[in-house]
Image: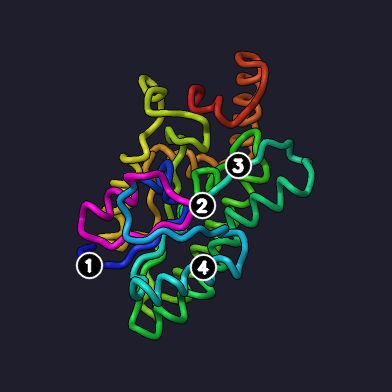
Amino acid sequence: MAFTGQTVVVTGGLSGIGAALVRQFEALGARVCVFDIVDVPASGASITAYVKCDVSVQQDLRDAIQKVEREVGAIDIFVSNAGVMSAGPPLGDGDDWARCLSVNLMAHVYAARVLIPLMAARGGGYLVTVASAAGLLNQIGDAAYSASKHAAVSFAESIAITHAEDNIGVSLVCPQYVATPLLGLTAADIEGQSLLTADQVADRVLHAVKARQFLVLPHPEVRTYALARAEDHDRWVSGMRKLRARSIKEYGDALPRRFYRLV
C-alpha cells in the first residue's frame, strides 16, 4: 500500500503516538487530517485539516468524518488513536469507567458505523485501532483502562472478520510502554528502560499497514507474555500479584506509570 495522495485521519493526533503518525504519514505524501479536543492546534503543525472533535460523542465524530469527506476527500485510512487512562481504583466511580469506555472503545465503534458503509461502497478502506498491550494482558492499577482496551481488541477482531469481504483492512496496534504524555513520560525517560518512543511505534504501524498486517506488537515481548498467560492463567495472575506487590514496596503505590521500570 502506498500512502501518496491518500486521505488519512488520525484521532488524538496532536501528541504522542498520534502526532508521530501524522508526521510519518505526511512524510510519505498522505493528506493527513487530525481530530483532537483542543480549539486550535499549535502553530507549526503540518496537517491538511484540523477538526475539533470529542471522539466519545457519536454525533461529534460523525460530523467530523462527514466534514473531511466533504471538504478534503474520501477517507482512505482512519486511525482511531485517541485514548485515556483512569486514575481511579478498580471499584472507582462511574465517571472514570464511562470516560475510559467511551474514548477507548465506543469511539472505535462510532467511527466504524460511519466509515464502513462509505468505504465498502467505494471498494474498500483501512481502519487502524490503537489499543494497548493491556488489551491482551492487563494494566495493573487501571482496571477501567484494561477492560476498555480488551473490548477494543475484540471489536477490531470482529471488524476484521466480518468486513474482509468489503475489502476493509484492519490493523490492531498493541504497544506496551511508550514515552508519551498519556503516561506522563518523555523520550528522556527511555534510557535503559523497556520504553519505545512514539516515532518508533508509528514506524512499525506504517509498516504493518503497508503489509495489511492485523496484529501489530511494537514490543515483541508482548507476544511471549500473552502466550504465557494463555498457557497457565493462574500462574500469570500470581505473577502479576507479585509485580504489584513489588511496585508498592519500591514506590509506595501501584500506579500504571511505575511498571515500565519493572517489566
Q: Which residue is mark 1?
A: 5
Q: Is residue 79 above or below residue 160?
A: above
**Where's residue 95, x and y in %?**
75, 48
First in sequence, mark 4 or 1: give its number.
Answer: 1
**Where's residue 126, x and y in %?**
37, 68
First in sequence, mark 3 or 2: give its number.
Answer: 2
Q: Nearer the viewer, mark 4 or mark 2?
A: 2
Q: Are marks 4 and 2 in contact (CB under 8 Å)?
A: no
Q: Which residue is mark 3?
A: 85
State whether residue 171 appears in this view: no
Q: Nearer the viewer, mark 3 or mark 1?
A: 1
Tally the numbered discs. Answer: 4
First in sequence, mark 2 or 1: give its number.
Answer: 1
Please give the label number shown on residue 146. Answer: none
Q: CA distance from mark 4 to mark 1?
A: 22 Å
Q: CA distance from mark 4 to mark 2?
A: 21 Å
Amino acid under disc 1: Gly
Quadrant hosting residue 208: bottom left
Q: Which residue is mark 2?
A: 39
First in sequence, mark 4 or 2: give its number.
Answer: 2
Task: Identify the residue at image location x=45%, y=36%.
Answer: 180
Q: Which residue is mark 4?
A: 111
Amino acid under disc 4: Ala
Region rendered in magenta: 21-44
Q: CA distance from mark 3 to mark 2?
A: 22 Å
Amino acid under disc 2: Asp
**Magenta segment includes 229:** no
Q: CA distance from mark 3 to mark 1?
A: 34 Å
Task: Identify the residue at image location x=39%, y=62%.
Answer: 9
Numbered disc 3: secondary structure: loop
Q: Are marks 4 and 1 in contact (CB under 8 Å)?
A: no
Q: Is residue 22 above or below residue 252?
A: below
